[in-house]
Amino acid sequence: MEEDTINKKNIYNLNNLNNLTENNNNNNNNNNKVSYNVSDLLKKISSLIDTCDYQLALQFSKKALSLENDNLKVLEILGMIEIELEMFDEAREHFSKAISINPNNGYSKYMYMGQLSCGLEAISYFQNGVNLMISEYDNSSKTTTTTTNSSLQDLQDDESNESNESNKQNQLNRKISNALCIMTEIYLTDCCFEVDAEQKCEEYLNKALELDLLNPEVYQLLASVRLSQQRNDDAKIALEKSLDLWINLDPGHSSIPSYESRISLVKLLIELSQYTKALNVLEILQKENDEVFDLWYLYGLCYFLMGQDSQNEQDRLTHWEDARDCLINYEKLHHKIGSDDEGILQHTQELLQTINAHVKPSLTSDAEEDDGDDDANEVYDDDDDDDADADEWEDFNANQNNHYNDDHQMEM
């Protein structure tokens, strides 16, 4: 029962909110006071985002927007929530409105619009965001210089201020560097046939390195560019630099690239026949999350190619046995979760056919228990959700009214 009660609070009932708002308006007429304002709603939205309750956060955000439809913070938060809920058209609408209201300040809305766009349109949004970040960096540098010159009488405070500003500038540099990497990727993919594509890639990567020499993403992307230019030796050097920057860091370190980025790194390493390094990265990824399709496919492909390149027959068979185990894991995961990438599934099956033609199948049973029907038997009660949603809003409004009553008594 307790678990059911918790689950019931996950969906917001708009009808109940409208009823509460009408009551609020009636109270406004009597008291000339509102029970809650946009600031109160933003606090609630923030707490809901922290718990990943995006559906309920969406409805609170819509109510905040109805109170102040030109509030930039509300527009941006609403757009972020809509991206999480894959409501991309709605997100574009709200970020576009935020840009039209204040085009010259705040880079985040441009970065989100870049993610929601394609080709040269995406480049344009990212470039605007980068320009604003660079402007912010320049202003921050000037502020640091001014503070340093005016704080000579207190060296301790000066050093502390300088350190904090330096950290902020480094973080901003990393953001700019990452944005330039995204723009480079667009020219490697969507805009690869543009006349100046290669020139733009070099320009963006040089700027990214100028800002942040310790960003592994830049070197990884540089390797992609060098591969496209058939400069394989230079690509290997770039990947070596990228790996050196994070491979020995403790798990969870902020400088370690994302899981998806490291999957892309493995693909590059395999393409350059750097199989041992690819396996090292895959082992790290497996410890973080072993239910990723690409992980097992790339594991299997790597072992298969190692066997294919081996001059020793026994080594070849050993590598292909390992490849088969990994590819079978991919198939099991595919049957368990499902995947839209039929191309990888087909290639996996082709590799297994090749392996089985040369390596005796193992005696391990591949039987799997099917427990997927349990979820289908779950009952979902909308009425219960409506009750829970009303409770959520009643609690929120009660808290706001209590704050008002306390303040009113203090005034008396």
Image (cartoon, rainbow, N blue to C red):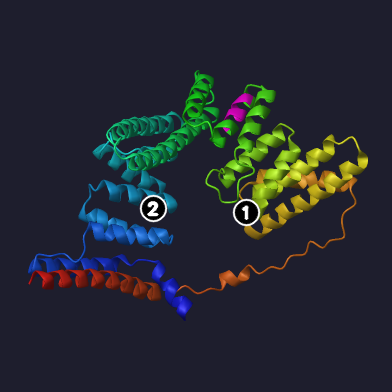
Q: Which mark is residue 81?
A: 2
Callout 1 crowding tier (Cα within 10 Å): few <14, some 14–19, many ≥20 = few
Specify the quadrant of the image occupied by residue 159: top left
Going by the numbered disc 1, the residue's amino acid type is Glu
Residue drawn 31% across and 56% down? 61
Question: Which element carries disc 1, helix, strand or loop?
Answer: helix
Distance from label 2 to label 1 (Cα)? 26 Å
Q: Is residue 202 visible?
A: yes
Decide which of 203, 215 is in the foreground and name it: 215
Image position, residue 220 (x, y; %): 59, 33
Residue drawn 81% across and 49% down? 322
**Main secondary structure along the magenta-highlighted residues:** helix
Going by the numbered disc 2, the residue's amino acid type is Ile
Count of numbered tags: 2
Q: Residue lying furthest front in this view?
A: 153
Q: Earlier in the sequence, mark 2 or mark 1?
A: 2
- Please say if 162 is above or below 356: above
Image position, residue 162 (x, y; %): 37, 38
Which residue is label 1 attached to? 288
Specify the quadrant of the image occupied by residue 95: top left
Image position, residue 267 (x, y; %): 66, 38
Decide which of 411, 37 is in the foreground and name it: 411
Residue drawn 60% across and 51% down? 251
In the image, the segment drawn in magenta is 221-226
| 373 lies left or right of 179 | right
Question: Which element carries disc 2, helix, strand or loop?
Answer: helix
Image position, residue 125 (x, y; %): 38, 33
Callout 2 crowding tier (Cα within 10 Å): few <14, some 14–19, many ≥20 = many
| 309 lies left or right of 276 | right
Q: Is residue 289 visible?
A: no
CB under 8 Å between discs 2 and 1 = no
Q: Please say whether residue 194 is one of the residues in the magenta stretch.
A: no
